Image (cartoon, grey):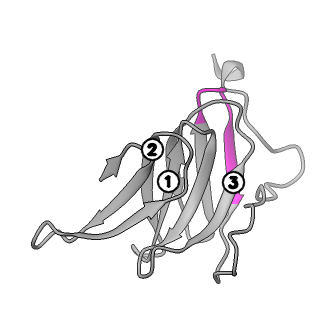
Amino acid sequence: MCSENTVRCIDTRGGDVEKTLSGHDGAITSVASLHSGACVASGSSDCSVRIWKVADGQCIGVGKGHDEEVGSLCCGDNFVASGSDDKTIRVWSVPRAPSPSPPELSDADPGPGQGDVDMTALD
């Protein structure tokens, strides 16, 4: 569940808020789970992506690079793909272990000739 610029993790059995994940400077626009629900990715109108550990609410990564709101997320085992109103898709490598301060996520290396996809090129 999202509220303004926080993500709230809710116990589905009782409806209680288990964790509140704070850190975005804008409204939350998308959420997806990864690592079998151990982590959550959030996208925001602040143009960033954050990765959170659900168990302790720690932010373990921040992805900055979009020029407009992040509207969609898709997660794999070691990546998060984010789609933005800037008409690009970015693929981010996901950190495996937490660090004292959340590192900036790095663009995953998609290989030669690949990278951000300009969505206008798909028309």
Q: Nearer the viewer, residue 7 or 117?
A: 7
The residue that disc 2 covers is 28
- Label 1 sits on a secondary structure element that is strand
**Could you tell whether 90 is left or right of 8 in the image?**
right
Q: Amino acid at mark 2?
A: Ile
Which of pointers 1 and 2 lies earlier in the amino acid sequence?
A: 2
Which mark is drawn over residue 63?
3
Q: Position of residue 95 (x, y in %)?
A: 67, 74
Please determine whether, in this image, residue 114 is positioned above or below residue 99: above
- Residue drawn where x is 79% and y is 54% of the image: 110
On whether residue 116 falls in the magenta region, the answer is no
**Residue 90 covered by magenta stretch:** yes
> Mark 1 is on which residue type?
Ser
User: What residue span does the magenta drawing correspond to?
Assistant: 84-92
Left or right: 121 with respect to 15? right
Q: Residue 92 placed where, x, y %?
A: 69, 57
Residue indicated by mark 1: 42
In the displayed orientation, state which residue is furthest to the top.
123
Work out how far the residue at label 3 is from the one at label 2, CA to CA, in angstroms: 14 Å
Residue found at x 9% / y 72%:
14
User: Which picture quadrant has residue 100?
Assistant: bottom right
